[in-house]
Image (cartoon, helix red, strand yellow):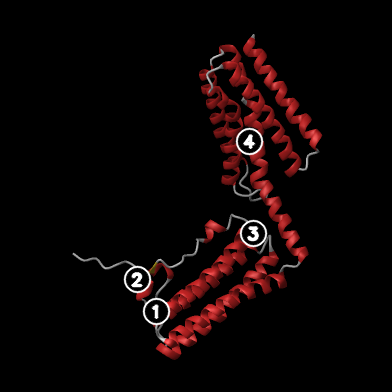
Amino acid sequence: MRFLPQRKRFKDLSEQEILALAVSSEEDDARIYRSYAEMLRADYPGSAKMFDGMAREEDEHRARLIAAHEARFGAVIPLIRREHVAGFYTRRPIWLIENLGIERIREEAEAMERDAERFYLAAAKRTSDSATRKLLGDLAAAEAGHQAAASALEEEHLSQDAKAEEEAASHRQFVLTWVQPGLAGLMDGSVSTLAPIFATAFATQDTWTTFLVGVAASVGAGISMGFTEAASDDGELSGRGSPVKRGIASGVMTTLGGLGHAMPYLIPEFWTATTIAIFIVFVELWAIAWIQNRYMETPFFRAVFQVVLGGALVLGAGVLIGSG
């Protein structure tokens, strides 16, 4: 039994189908730009206006393509879309892009225009018909013009002040969604596991047992912190962003914070493992102090006093308890 291919190869498309594909692609891109605009309008009004303008540009080009199709092939345009053509470039779903930040969205828009230009240039090389080749070349030039138009729209709607304001908003959102819960997790994982790990180490002087206790404490703390962060605030009123992202940031960093000084106990020799673990603890604590100073604007010496001194006290308590 012969099976018909589910998708057509690009080289097998007729001139009419190539033009129809261009129409549907322009239509889809206009819809994507409008989605970006609506998604960004509340927090990034300048970028939203830019994407509104880009959507209007796509509408104008689609109208020109439809007019060209009507002139050559009539009013009925075949239904052919990107997903119908094997190997044709695809667009990422909106939900994969919307949570990646304003700069990532702008980069995606630039990539969209480059993909479209390459499509028309490649299509022109695949045809021997002079009229079709000219049409495809004109479309490639139009897509290159889109990139220039996008730059012009960005300059029109995104002044330096607007860009600075949007970058500040993006940085603030990054801190609230990723840095703040991640930092809380790292602090919890690094500090809360010190006492059980070092108490076990000095009580048993068995590196494998200490490693197992450290892994259990780290993973348990990570799961607990992750679920607690995700369940504590849905982000709607606080503006802290997706609870899933915050839960992942908190849970992963909590686990890593504990594993950092548990991993050296894979070394069989007790004092070698313990010396390395203590060194890693102080590296972790200084890193936490630096992150607090860098992203949370906590004065550096205040952060050092709070984190390093507090961690050292917990470490000392674990050693004393385990040695008792």
Q: Quadrant of the N terminus?
A: bottom left
Q: Quadrant of residue 145?
A: bottom right
Q: Earlier in the sequence, mark 1 or mark 3?
A: 1
Disc on res. 17: 1
Q: Position of residue 38 (x, y in %)?
A: 61, 65
Disc on res. 103: 3
> Label 3 is placed on what type of residue?
Glu
Q: Position of residue 156 (x, y in %)?
A: 72, 73
Q: Earlier in the sequence, mark 1 or mark 2?
A: 2
Q: Secondary structure at mark 3?
A: helix
Residues 70 and 2: in front is 2
Q: Which residue is mark 2?
A: 8
Q: Earlier in the sequence, mark 2 or mark 3?
A: 2
> Label 4 is placed on what type of residue?
Gly
CA neighbours of label 1 inside 10 A, class few (<14), some (14 to 19), many (20+): some
Q: Quadrant of residue 258?
A: top right
Q: Are marks 2 and 3 in contact (CB under 8 Å)?
A: no
Of badges 2 and 4, the one in the foreground is 2
Q: Could you give the CA–CA distance between mark 2 and mark 3, rounded to whole angstroms?
A: 35 Å
Disc on res. 185: 4
* Residue extending furthest toward the left: 1
Q: Could you give the CA–CA distance between mark 1 and mark 3, rounded to whole angstroms?
A: 35 Å
Q: Could you give the CA–CA distance between mark 2 and mark 4, rounded to whole angstroms?
A: 51 Å
> Label 2 is placed on what type of residue?
Lys
CA neighbours of label 2 inside 10 A, class few (<14), some (14 to 19), many (20+): some
> Label 1 is placed on what type of residue?
Glu
Q: Earlier in the sequence, mark 4 or mark 3?
A: 3
Q: Earlier in the sequence, mark 1 or mark 4?
A: 1
Q: Are marks 1 and 2 in contact (CB under 8 Å)?
A: yes
Q: Are marks 1 and 3 in contact (CB under 8 Å)?
A: no
Q: Could you give the CA–CA distance between mark 1 and mark 2, rounded to whole angstroms?
A: 11 Å
